[in-house]
Amino acid sequence: MEKLIDSLKKLSNAHGISGHEDGIRAIMEAELKPYVDEVITDKMGNLIATKKGEGPSIMIATHMDEIGLMVQYIDDKGFLKFVKIGGWFDSTLHSQRVIVHTKNGPIPGVIGCKPPHVMKEEDRKRPVKSEDMFIDVGATSREDAEKMGITVGTPVSMDREVVALANGKITGKAFDNRAGCAILLEVMRQLAEKNIKATIYAVGTVQEEVGLKGARTSAFSLDPDIALAVDTTVAGDHPGIEKKDAAVEQGKGGVITVADASGRGLIASPQVVKWLKETADSKHIPYQLEVGDGGTTDATAIHLTREGIPSSVISVVTRYIHSPVEVVDMADVKACVDLLVNAIENIENYF
């Protein structure tokens, strides 16, 4: 468990918004190389690590990108206007510390807006929108900001690091989907010590948060027999949310997706779901089933590739998803590792 926690901390504390996953890819490549036969980066930027075998081929996809921001405009006083890259809820952005990733290196900044003291009464009653916010790096002019290396298109990420909470829970940024990345690394480490006949494609995908883009191109290239996305899913166990909106809870194991986005995204292969359920039952690994009506994952793009690829998702229940303070239970993270390792050991009995 300690190695798994350390891996998640390292990945979460690193930075890599959609389209700028280089730092995360470097970490994953270094970690995966000892356990696989080949590691490549494709034209899209996906990391593909292959452990060769003679049995069926399985693609395990986990996206490397995190939601972030991008500089859209620098005003005359040196304040940065930005656009959201990925699905931010605007209220979570207000008053956050950020890191502006310039060509000269990282620069700290803060997200500001008009203070409530000078707002009209009706404006104070409304949530502040992202278009009314800006990033302050301390620059005195546009020229000053440009000298720092800031340009239009400079990526921006949240300035947060992982800390421990009580009872095995931890909080940090980008657990969506650095939790999935940490799971993939641990799974491949454990499988390296076993006699696995399947061919395994361990794939770190790019640009999931902005359209499942890397999953689509890598799945087309690999054309696996089966695929699993490893991701996070919304918790239904805290105030303000009802079980009808999110039925899964922290501390009750990993989540096997039956369908998401009300079927508009993925309707999982019944055979894949059966394989995962029966593996978990036989090995006494805690798990939950999910039928969701909200978001979707890389599996949606993968399962529609070529003539179709039987797919499902294994997810970690995550509180406050798409915020800088996401929370996971490490027991759930470990349960996802255990399910994946045991399922792949058992794959030839199903496919």
Image (tube, rainbow, N blue to C red):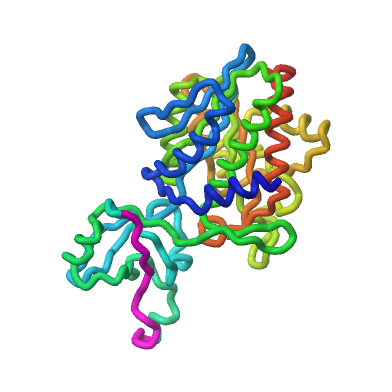
179 on left or right of 289: left
Q: How many marks?
A: 0
* Identity of the residue drawn at 41% across and 45% down: 210
Q: Residue at x 79, y 39 (%)?
A: 285
Q: Quadrant of residue 26?
A: top left
Tell me where residue 39 appears, x and y as whole percent: 48, 26
Question: Is residue 262 visible to the viewer in this orientation of the structure?
Answer: no
Q: Residue 176 magenta-drawn?
A: no
Q: Is residue 49 above or below residue 255?
A: above
Q: How far from the left and from the top, in percent, is residue 8? A: 59, 48
Nearer to us in this view, 210 or 294: 210
Could you tell whether 314 is left or right of 28 in the image? right
The residue positioned farthest toward the top in the image shown: 54
The front one of 314 and 242 is 314
Say whether residue 108 is magenta: yes
Where's residue 293, x and y in %? Answer: 59, 48
Instruction: Examine the rendered structure and indicate whether residue 86 appears above or below residue 90.
Output: above
Q: Residue at x 69, y 51 (%)?
A: 330
Q: What span is colored magenta in the figure?
A: 105-120
Q: Which of 188/234 is in front?
A: 188
Q: Quadrant of residue 213?
A: top left
**Quadrant, the C terminus:** top right
